[in-house]
Image (tube, helix red, strand yellow):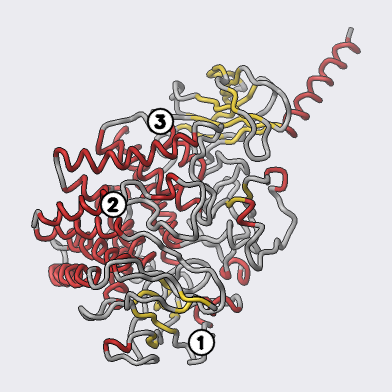
Amino acid sequence: MQKFLAIILLMISFVQVFAQEQSWIRINQLGYLPDNRKVAVWVTKSDVQLKNFSLIDPNTNQKVFTAKAGKEFGKYGPFSKGYRLDFSKFNKNGEYFILADDGTKSPTFKINSEVYKGTADFTLRYMRQQRTLFNPFLQDSCHTHDGFTMYASSVGMPDSTRVEVAGGWHDASDYLQYATTSANATYHLLAAYRDFPAVFSDEKQANGLDGKNGIADVLDEAIWGLDWLLKMHPKPNIMFNQIADDRDHTKMRLPGQDSVYGRGHERPVYFIDGNPQQRGKFMNNTTGTSSTAAKFVGAFGLGHHLLKNQNVEYANLLKDKAATAYQYAYIKPGVTQTVSVKSPYIYAEDNWVDDMELAEATMFNLNKDKSHIDKALAFARQEKVTPWMVRDTANHYQYYPFINLGHFELAKSSVGQVKKEALSYYKQGIEEVNSRAKENMFLRGVPFIWCSNNLTTSFAIQCIWYKEASGDKQFEELEQANIDWLFGVNPWGTSMVYGLPAHGDTPTEPHSAFTYLHNYPIDGGLVDGPVYSAIYNNLIGIQLYKPDAYADFQSDLVVYHDDFGDYSTNEPTMDGTASLIYLLSAKENESKKKD
């Protein structure tokens, strides 16, 4: 009898080991808020069917909750099937793991109201590390000689004219600086402070070094962005679009060692003239001045609103600059793309009416002229839904920002039919994504284009804004699924944010000179995220530097590599991180409201 029992136990153990090798449970590594939707995802490469799952208290090894696995989803990526394990009805604080009835066990996770506490401030670390002029992480200066002009002869500045535009943030792991991404990042930081001021601490001075200054750190960071945007729009008839170009990519180095443009430490500064400019062997597809200039309007206007009671002179300057940027946007209606000299890769922004909608809503908030509402609504009707939401692919930054900020500001500034119409466009976009999402176990409807994590973050924000403004909660599970995706409920089971959570599986080998050369942490950086295999296989100059830790989870559909050599999926971006700061501040604020 004992021999027979031993054989049975051995067989059970074998089944469990086999299940663990063939099946996995993906969880949000940050944890779950008690009263939110709480879902993990069980996936397998086998033909096992799942019926039930349980939550286990690891301290007692006792079941505290059991439920049915629910609907079976079919093949997705590397998996043959999967289930969404919904334990939303369980809301007791504590630490738990999930045990599926096939023996698959999840990592331990938390349920409590503090799982998002401090996360927005943590991600601010990456923004400070991206600062140029004075970099508080390195405690050193860089790019202090920016720069010399290009394409500005029409305003009396022949090529190579010296201008003073030092400041702002590096765009990603390279050291280019783009007005379009920086203005968008500044707007998100300002909006985070506007909407959730109680979330942020004051632990840093304005220069980013330790010490309180009576201003929330997120506002300090936003002002850093505003200061640079002011330099990039020094006069009503002058606006610059970017500093540096892809010659930056010749070698890995820290920012203070940047000298690749043949003029010492000076870098080129590209003027916005509304006409096509250099793009490697080609010209870019610039058609006008609106897209970048209108983003300036949004950032300047919101900055004025938040600072008018504490720094009147600065706030009035921002108001004046919003007005001149607004005029600049109308010089030549159209889109301003970025410039590349050696490679074919640029920020190929192709839409601009969303930026103009934001500019018009912003101008209404500044001067209360109702004609701006009419103009904003007219622009809104030209692009009701951000185009990537109805497509399964797009060029790099083709539709930027990845969320229509104008719809939200128009809804906030209006009542009645105008507000209802603006929100209906948000709903339409969410429904487009949801139509794809409901077909797979991850509720994944966001396309795997370059910077898919940025799209995911923006989409989650759109779901939040729509829910809060309309009261319609039907997309809550979809909203949370996109947040969960960023923190581990994805095929690879990894968080997409460097160092968050500290105890989790997060990127360790990002495409960054800071980590590659000196092993400096890039805390809080949101990496680009997974891309379609078809995109990855056609990119130039990608090679993996180590064996792929996620090889079992790659597929013909999509790939993600935690590897320095993969600049397409594992490079952090400044603007994506700024959007994440807004999203995390919204989640932390949500938990505060429920305490």
Task: Tell us which disc is closer to us: 2 or 1.
Answer: 2
Secondary structure, mark 3, is loop
Q: Does dot 1 land on a helix, a strand or a loop? A: loop
Disc 2, SS = helix
Label 3 – label 1 distance at C-alpha: 52 Å
Tell me: residue 313, above or below residue 72.
Answer: below
Identify the image quadrant of residue 70: top right
- Please give the name of the residue rendered at 43% of the width and 80% of the height, measured from the top-left corner: 141
> Which residue lies under the disc numbered 3?
36
- Residue 131 located left or right of residue 61: left
Label 1 belongs to which residue?
261
Q: Which residue is mark 2?
A: 382
Residue 488, position in %: x, y? 56, 42
- Do tag 3 and tag 2 residues touch (Cβ < 8 Å)? no
For marks 2 and 1, give the CA distance: 41 Å
* Disc on the earlier residue, 3 or 2: 3
Residue 565: x and y, percent? Answer: 65, 64
Q: Are marks 3 and 1 in contact (CB under 8 Å)?
A: no
Amino acid of disc 2 = Gln
Residue 564 vs residue 343, the one in the foreground: 343
Instruction: Say which of marks 3 and 2 sits in front.
Output: 2
Tell me where residue 229 appears, x and y as whole percent. Answer: 30, 72
Look at label 1 and name its amino acid.
Tyr
Instruction: Identify the mark nearer the N-term, 2 or 1.
Output: 1
